[in-house]
Image (cartoon, rainbow, N blue to C red):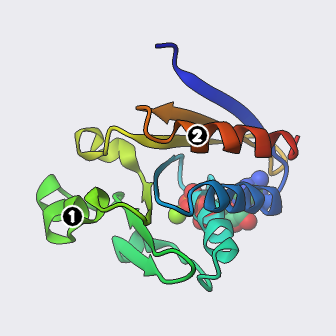
Amino acid sequence: MKEKNFLIYTNDPIQTKHLGAFLGKVGHEGIVICLEGDLGAGKTTLTQGLAASLHCGSASSPTFNLMNIYEGDVPIYHFDLYRLNSEDDLYEIGFYEYVQEDGEIIIIEWPDRFPSSIPEDNLYIKIYEQENNRRKITVTLNGTKYQNQYEELKKLCQSLQ
Ligand SMILES: Nc1ncnc2c1ncn2[C@@H]1O[C@H](COP(=O)(O)OP(=O)(O)O)[C@@H](O)[C@H]1O
Ligand SMILES: [Mg+2]
């Protein structure tokens, strides 16, 4: 099957938060979202937009926590694999149990640290910093479970451009 992906640009953090809100909209019945990008790319900013759209209060960077849980309309489990040393740590924080459950939003920052631990079905988002606050963002559908969510997201994103 041809890889499904699309590309969008955001011009400021607010637009990136809008993308996060779209993800919350399409993913409110449960989804796994991977967020790849350098430090300062906007992964947490996007997550804040998602969390706010589901009335979860404020999301913060989990880099110092490894995992944050936000309780809103839908539970959001926000992982940051940046400072994890080994896959054993993933067991310790309960990662594999959380990602098996349905009906919650799983956000994984730095999925590229432990690619073999990431669920096969996911929406994979990469954020690239450009000049003047612009971000190039690619969205890829991995597996087929979230195909409908992917298509709906693609439509919503057309309104951002
Ligand atoms: N288009 C944009 N999208 C997202 N963040 C942006 C954008 N332009 C500027 N920024 C700024 O870049 C920083 C991104 O930080 P953060 O979301 O914590 O990154 P990460 O979690 O990827 O390390 C924030 O200070 C944000 O205000
Ligand atoms: Mg971050």
Res 7 label: none
Q: Can you give x and y, in whole percent of width and height, for residue 89 in the image?
A: 16, 64
How many residues crowd mark 1 within 10 Å: few (<14), some (14–19), many (20+)?
few
Q: Secondary structure at mark 2?
A: helix
Q: Earlier in the sequence, mark 1 or mark 2?
A: 1
- Judge from the rendering whether residue 56 lies leftward or rightward of residue 159; answer left or right: left
**Is the CB of mark 2 within 8 Å of ligand 1?**
no
Q: Which residue is mark 1?
A: 97
Q: Nearer the viewer, mark 1 or mark 2?
A: 2
Q: Can you give x and y, in whole percent of width and height, for residue 137 in the image?
A: 67, 40
* Residue at 34 percent of width and 58 percent of height: 81
- Judge from the rendering whether residue 94 lies leftward or rightward of residue 7; answer left or right: left
Quadrant of the image occupied by residue 7: top right
Residue 71 in sight: yes
* Residue at 67 percent of width and 76 percent of height: 52
Q: Can you give x and y, in whole percent of width and height, for residue 123 in the image?
A: 50, 42
Q: Can you give x and y, in whole percent of width and height, for residue 80 in the image?
A: 39, 62
- Judge from the rendering whether residue 147 lies leftward or rightward of residue 26; answer left or right: left
Q: Which residue is mark 2?
A: 148
Query: Which kind of residue does numbered mark 2 sit on?
Result: Asn
How many residues crowd mark 2 within 10 Å: few (<14), some (14–19), many (20+)?
few
